[in-house]
């Protein structure tokens, strides 16, 4: 089948044709005129476009050796299905994800061994202190959340993460305008110049994290970032002693969509920042090709507190390395009403006083 060449107006998208009277290409819809060289360059840019290629080599981790899994046990939460790795001396505990008891079901075997681990640098005392400070700033927090016994429920968990490295070749194209205005004794004039701006380059991404557990909300895990990966060490089972460790149930391949979205946003922001000096800027197209991709499997330290109040679950997380804490808090409606009525009363009194003073004047 013969190839059909169509020319579209870069400004309005309408079909354009050669106008013999002016010896230029002209759009009959917006009256924009184009030099032939300009359209030739535009056509050349269109032919350079590529589709996204954001595929990954998702092989990560190593095979467990028999002597490395001695002394480790897997506990399965019968409530939420979370898998937790503990040392052999742990007979029973509670699930850090839903708070229910967990029971040992089997020994570790046949699973991917982590490549790296970031050891806990914040101990439980630091986590409890941070949680108390977090609570202290919330005047409308229900009393149950400030109970000492409740605060002691905080647990240290190694959360599974996939760490993605890649080189990204990107090409972006923008439609931009510059506007010039002037006037004479009779008229005001506005001239709008349209430009096609292209950007291309390479960006390197290292250790883009994606948690590999469905029990951990993705937004919560992203909120406690960043981790200092310079403190990451080769994995040794001994780092798990005294803590819990969740096994991944989302593999590396299943995590690529989230990672690609993070890479896309970062790449677009970097290129967008280079398009300056125009009245308007609109991104037209963009493509990203990944290469030299690698994925590693790591366990990262997180302090967790799970609680249930008024039939609703609340989960708090603190970065076990940096101490950054995040989490949603409930609202004590009774305390809120008292605060709101008090605030409303104070505002009303101020308005009354202001009205009285104005009337006296």
Image (spheres, grey):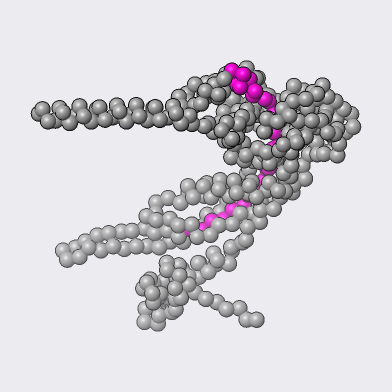
Examine the rendered structure and indicate whether residue 319 appears above or below residue 161: above
Task: Give yes or no for residue 270 being in the magenta stretch.
Answer: no
Q: Tell me what residue is drawn at x 52 percent, y 76 percent.
A: 6
- 104 sits to left or right of 47: right
Task: Report whether residue 186 is seen.
Answer: yes
Q: Position of residue 108 (x, y in %)?
A: 84, 34
Q: Main secondary structure of the magenta part?
A: strand
Q: Position of residue 277 (x, y in %)?
A: 39, 51
Q: Which residues are magenta?
A: 148-174
Image quadrant assignment for residue 237: top right
Foreground: 50 or 129?
129
Q: Tell me what residue is drawn at x 28 percent, y 29 percent.
A: 347
Q: Which residue sits furthest left?
A: 361
Examine the rendered structure and indicate whether residue 59 appears above or below residue 300: below
- 174 sits to left or right of 312: left
Q: Position of residue 342 (x, y in %)?
A: 34, 26
Task: Report whether residue 197 is seen.
Answer: no
Task: Give yes or no for residue 152 being in the magenta stretch.
Answer: yes
Foreground: 185 or 262?
262
Q: Tell me what residue is drawn at x 47 percent, y 47 percent.
A: 273
């Amino acid at each position: 089948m013969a190839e059909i060449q169509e020319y579209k107006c870069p400004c309005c998208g309408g079909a354009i044709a050669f106008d013999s009277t002016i010896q230029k290409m002209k759009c009959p819809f917006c009256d924009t005129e184009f030099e032939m060289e300009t359209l030739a360059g535009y056509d050349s840019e269109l032919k350079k476009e590529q589709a996204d290629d954001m595929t990954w080599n998702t092989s990560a981790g190593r095979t467990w050796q028999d002597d490395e899994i001695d002394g480790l046990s897997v506990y399965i939460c019968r409530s939420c299905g979370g898998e937790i790795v503990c040392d052999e001396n742990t007979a029973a505990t509670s699930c850090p994800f839903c708070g229910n008891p967990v029971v040992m079901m089997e020994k570790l075997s046949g699973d991917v061994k982590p490549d790296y681990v970031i050891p806990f640098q914040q101990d439980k005392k630091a986590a409890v202190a941070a949680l108390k400070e977090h609570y202290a700033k919330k005047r409308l927090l229900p009393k149950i959340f400030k109970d000492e016994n409740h605060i002691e429920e905080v647990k240290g968990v190694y959360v599974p993460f996939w760490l993605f490295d890649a080189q990204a070749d990107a090409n972006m194209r923008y439609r931009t305008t510059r506007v010039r205005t002037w006037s004479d004794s009779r008229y005001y004039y506005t001239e709008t110049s349209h430009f096609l701006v292209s950007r291309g380059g390479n960006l390197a991404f290292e250790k883009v994290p994606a948690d590999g557990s469905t029990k951990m909300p993705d937004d919560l895990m992203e909120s406690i970032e960043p981790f200092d990966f310079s403190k990451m060490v080769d994995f040794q089972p001994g780092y798990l002693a005294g803590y819990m460790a969740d096994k991944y149930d989302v593999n590396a391949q299943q995590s690529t969509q989230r990672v690609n979205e993070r890479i896309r946003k970062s790449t677009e922001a970097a290129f967008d920042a280079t398009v300056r000096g125009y009245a308007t800027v609109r991104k037209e197209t963009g493509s990203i090709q990944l290469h030299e991709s690698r994925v590693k499997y790591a366990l990262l330290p997180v302090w967790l507190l799970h609680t249930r109040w008024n039939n609703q679950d609340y989960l708090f997380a603190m970065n076990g390395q940096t101490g950054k804490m995040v989490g949603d808090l409930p609202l004590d409606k009774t305390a809120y009403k008292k605060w709101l009525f008090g605030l409303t009363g104070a505002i009303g009194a101020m308005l009354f006083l202001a009205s009285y003073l104005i009337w006296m004047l």
